[in-house]
Image (tube, rainbow, N blue to C red):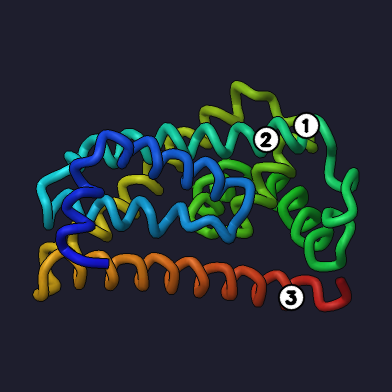
Amino acid sequence: MTDDWLQVLAHSPWALPAMAALVVGDAFLVVIPGEAAVTTFGALAVAEGAPPLFAVIAVAAVAALTGDVGCYFLGRTVGLDRWRWMRGRRVSAAFGWARDALARRGATLMFTARFIPFARLAVNIAAGASGMRLGRYVVLAAPAATAWALYQALLGAAVAAIIPGGTVAAVVVSIALALAIGAVADALVARARRRRAPDV
């Protein structure tokens, strides 16, 4: 990774479509670095002046909502136990937690889960499987996706504005922060879930 390579990436017409693809994919597979992609382009928007920060935020928000709605329809279509990976101990426990939490505090959960990689997947699939109306789901998911896009892009922008050392340093620190924050959030949610249901 070099400044020249990042400059080419920042000004490429494929930059935002590639970021959008990663964000949509991240909704289904948490190993895809959607957060890191948005944070990277937020940093590039400040360090290189391209792509525009508002475009990064807008594209990331639309892509995040698209991925979340896809997971909703996956849950509505296949339920919570159709495939083998869904019946694993940890995954089924996460789906059970998400289904119960949606019934108690749907709006709050939908918003906060967008910022927590594995919880996001579980909540969106559970929302579809539980029969939540699509209209209500989108009303809850759209602000969450927008807030997530704002947060991730502005995190990268802030790092680029603060960290010395040029574009490479800004991007590396931004990616590290995005991955670390996501990992910590997932770990905290998993710990809280174990405390509430030690017998699961």
Q: Secondary structure at mark 3?
A: helix
Q: Which residue is mark 3?
A: 194
Q: Is residue 173 left or right of residue 72?
A: left
Is the residue 92 above or below the residue 81 in the image? below
For disc 1, the neighbor class at 10 Å (few under 14, some 14 to 19, many from 20) is many
Q: Position of residue 160 (x, y in %)?
A: 16, 63
Is disc 1 in contact with disc 2, using a CB cutoff of under 8 Å? yes
Q: Secondary structure at mark 1?
A: helix
Q: Which residue is mark 2?
A: 72
Please report the residue visible at 83 percent of the width from the left and 56 percent of the height from the top: 85
Please report the residue visible at 56 percent of the width from the left and 38 percent of the height from the top: 67
Q: Which residue is mark 1?
A: 76
For disc 3, the neighbor class at 10 Å (few under 14, some 14 to 19, many from 20) is few
Front position in the image: 154 or 98: 154
Is the residue 110 above or below the residue 59 in the image? below
Q: Amino acid at mark 1?
A: Arg
Q: Secondary structure at mark 2?
A: helix
Quote the CA–CA distance across marks 1 and 2: 6 Å
Quote the CA–CA distance across marks 1 and 3: 27 Å
Q: Amino acid at mark 3?
A: Arg
